[in-house]
Amino acid sequence: MTLRDVDVDVDAVMADLHGRVRERLRAQLVEGGEHAFDDPSLFADVEAVLHAAASTPDAARLILPELLGDPHLWRLTTSLRYASHRGPAAAGLFMFVKRRVLMPLFRWLYEYSRDNFDRQRRTNHVLFACVQALALETALLRREVRRLAARPPATGLAQDSDAPPPSTPRG
Amino acid sequence: MKLAFVVQRYGADIAGGSEGHCRELAERLAPRHDLIVLTTCAKDYVTWENELPAGRSVEHGVTVLRFPVARQRRMKLFADLSDEVFDSGAPRERQEEWFRENGPDTPALLEHLRAHGREFDLVVFWTYRYFQSYFGLPLVADRAVLVPTAEEDAAINLDVLPDFFDKPAGYLFLTPEEQELVSSRAYRPLHPAVVAGIGLERVPIGGTPRAPLDALNIPPKYLLYLGRVDRNKGCDALVENFQEYAATRPDVTLVLAGPAKMQIPAHRQIRALGYVTDAVREALLAHAQALVVPSWYESLSIVLLEAWNSAVPALVNGRCKVLAGQVTRANGGLYYMFPAEFDEAADYLLNRPNERAALGRQGLAYVEREYRWPTVLSRVEGLFEDVRRVRTRSAPRAQTVRS
């Protein structure tokens, strides 16, 4: 087989590839009963909002975690801190046993749980980002609705929202 | 110029991206500058056990001064401390303790920098996350160049880093994405700086014999992963994605070439080769349909550049900004974010020979443009000159103010 010399634009290929993957997902959702996604452009809008939110970097600051207050009350803590409520001598013994005897025995279980907590923490972050994106969308829509509601009622075709005001010169 | 290169490990048989970057630059710059490498006696980046003799030696024309590591890494303590400081909210002292525990704890190297650091025009530090950079760089900040080799992992978000990233007199980055990442964690614009990467020598295209692959019974239609087979490199997700993919494509094989640090499932379309010889490695690269790089965290993927150097296209994890950026700039491959995209992108690369060849060719052209040694060295030496110029310009002013 002889290879033809072609140029390939990665951005174009990726756009095409993303389009095919999105379309397949949309078809599956419609098949599953989500008929609102019969409209491909509606699906594209929804996907764009969620995709942007889901791509939020782990380190990004978000509003919801700030509103939840003290992180100790809600954040998943994956690190293990050894502590004891007993007096200094007994505490030393108990800490030694926890650290040197129990921890090596159960380290596999601890690491398994930690991996799962890490996944849950990442999922929580993405969900916070999605809620924030949706709240932002809602706020913008509310603002737009209020702006439209405040406009004087239309009296004729000339004041159709898409038509220019009568004084606008036409080129 | 009188230069000191400071790196956690050094040697021809030391595997590691930043160590290799340091050595390649040192061997090429040593004939043109008065250069010394200050490093440790460690070979193992996990334990930092002293394995090489302390003191001065000359290796491939480079003078090397090794210092003993005071204590090996305490793995469990380090793992717990990592969990604690990456949880965020840990006080600065605990974060600084993390750099100490990460090692290699080499007080004699710091002492040497304190006593002799000002005898050099520039002191170049590799990798922000290790002891010798974090505690050594501030001792010679006015003449320090940092090669951060930063990735988008948890360590980059430590609160102590913006202060640290503000200190050096110059910065050498591996990719524009790394520059952007480190800049986003600093309080001031990071100048002077250059994105230099690493250089590659030309390799013959099209003439590599397939015999070593035939001996291993490697079929022609394969995707190649090259490097440590490790969860930290995204290999668990790759193996999982590929098993799904292979269920409906019985003619495709995934070849994993590198030491395995995780369980690899027995699957008739997955070949795990372990360590491979140079001849096998070259043949695998030359004949692969595409190289797969599934890693989430990279500051520069040298193996990706090696694939392009052999005109082989790449399929990379798009969640790693560096990899997606490299592939897009080079027009040298595709990227995926989730399994459905992996399937589509792999199909495209495996089933379209013209486009596959074009992506490989475009990758090679990118390497020619950006990653040949003369280009890389001129960028690096240009940065060194800039940093020295800025320092010598500001030094007399500082003296005037003092007097």
Image (spheres, coloured by chain):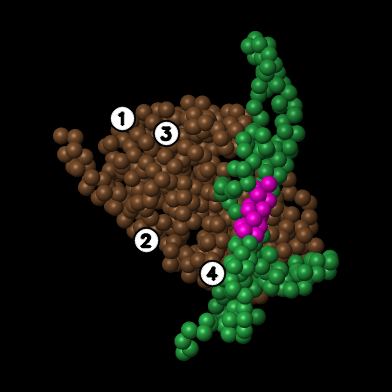
Chain colours: A green, B brown
Judging from the image, mark 4 belongs to the subunit labelled B
Q: Position of residue B215 (x, y in %)?
A: 69, 59
The first of marks 3 and 1 along the sequence is 1
The residue under the point 77% across, 69% down is A36
Where on the picture, by quarter, is residue B271? bottom right
Helix, strand or loop for disc 4? loop
Q: Nearer the viewer, residue B89 or A153?
A: A153
Q: Are marks 3 and 1 in contact (CB under 8 Å)?
A: no
Label 3 vs label 1, nearer the camera: 3
Judging from the image, mark 3 belongs to the subunit labelled B
Which dot marks residue B331? 4
The first of marks 4 and 1 along the sequence is 1
The residue under the point 53% across, 57% down is B322
The residue singled out by tag 3 in the image is B135
The residue singled out by tag 2 in the image is B374
Q: Are marks 3 and 1 on the same chain?
A: yes
Q: Nearer the viewer, residue A78 or B325?
A: A78
The first of marks 2 and 4 along the sequence is 4
Q: Amino acid at mark 4?
A: Asn
Q: Position of residue B38 (x, y in %)?
A: 39, 37
Q: Amino acid at mark 3?
A: Phe
- Mark 2: few, some, or many residues within 10 Å (few <14, many ≥20)? few
Where on the picture, by quarter, is residue B139? top left
Which dot marks residue B115? 1
Q: Are marks 2 and 1 in contact (CB under 8 Å)?
A: no
Judging from the image, mark 1 belongs to the subunit labelled B
Quadrant in the picture for the C terminus of chain B: top left
Q: Is residue A65 left or right of residue B65?
A: right
Q: CA distance from mark 4 to mark 1?
A: 49 Å
- Mark 3: few, some, or many residues within 10 Å (few <14, many ≥20)? some
Q: Position of residue B175 (x, y in %)?
A: 47, 56
